[in-house]
Image (cartoon, rainbow, N blue to C red):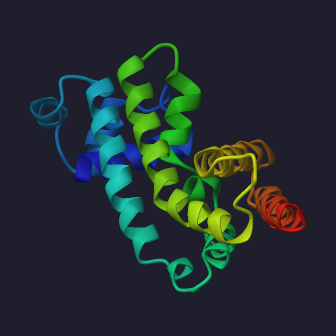
Amino acid sequence: MRILDAAIASVREKGYAATRVDEVATAAGVTKGGFFHHFKNKEEMAVAAAARWSEVTGQLFEAAPYHLPDDPLDRVLAYIDFRREIIGGQTDEFTCYVGTLAQEVHLSAPAIREAARASIFAHAETYEVDIDAAKAEHCPDADWSAESLALHIQAVLQGAFIIAKADGGPDRARESVDHLKRYVELLFEKDDRR
């Protein structure tokens, strides 16, 4: 676990390419040989760290308060609010490990890309259920799918993280999430009027 947590921290701070095995081993309190006892190479570590990321973030999101509202649309909007709330501090504190992996190695490391995809898509599925219920209740005839909106939300969040990295802080990422919330509200409002 310590190696995987150190790998996640390093990739979030400086990216996959700049992450070095010896630095991860040192941060985890193991020797380089100890690292290679657990992983054949850096790529295998990154894939395992994607599963660790899903586990840790899954616990965070499972315990989050956005699950509390009765109305599924309120839960979807509360999810977006929660995502905005956790954007703060240095970029490595709130940006996405698997999003960073996907951006960097989607062509050069298929196993890492697939691990990143699995994590991102699995997370989207966790709130796709609420989107589907909100659609059924508020706009059943809408011509979009819950899956497509869940993935669009992920796309905006990942893009917001890129903006944050480029800008050096969280403010513009939060603005992107504000726009996302307005979009979702308008999407349901527009479809409610049909």
Left or right: where 29 falls relative to 49? left
Left or right: where 108 falls relative to 86? left
Residue 105 lies, in percent from the top left, at 50, 22
In the image, is residue 109 above or below residue 56?
above
Question: Residue farthest to the top?
Answer: 108
Q: Nearer the viewer, residue 133 or 43?
A: 133
Q: Nearer the viewer, residue 19 or 193?
A: 193
Q: Is residue 142 visible?
A: yes
| Mark count | 0
Left or right: where 113 falls relative to 95? left
Check the picture and name the quadrant holding the C terminus.
bottom right
Could you tell me which residue is drawn at 27 percent across and 39 percent down? 48
In the image, is residue 3 above or below residue 170?
above
Residue 45 lies, in percent from the top left, at 28, 33
Residue 122 lies, in percent from the top left, at 43, 48
Q: Nearer the viewer, residue 2 or 58?
A: 58
Residue 133 lies, in percent from the top left, at 57, 67
Could you tell me which residue is drawn at 35 percent across and 22 percent down? 111
Left or right: where 190 falls relative to 111? right
In the image, is residue 101 above or below residue 142?
above
Q: Nearer the viewer, residue 147 or 39?
A: 147
In the image, is residue 177 above or below residue 42?
below
Q: Is residue 88 visible?
A: no
Could you tell me which residue is drawn at 18 percent across and 23 percent down? 40
Could you tell me which residue is drawn at 85 percent across and 65 percent down? 182
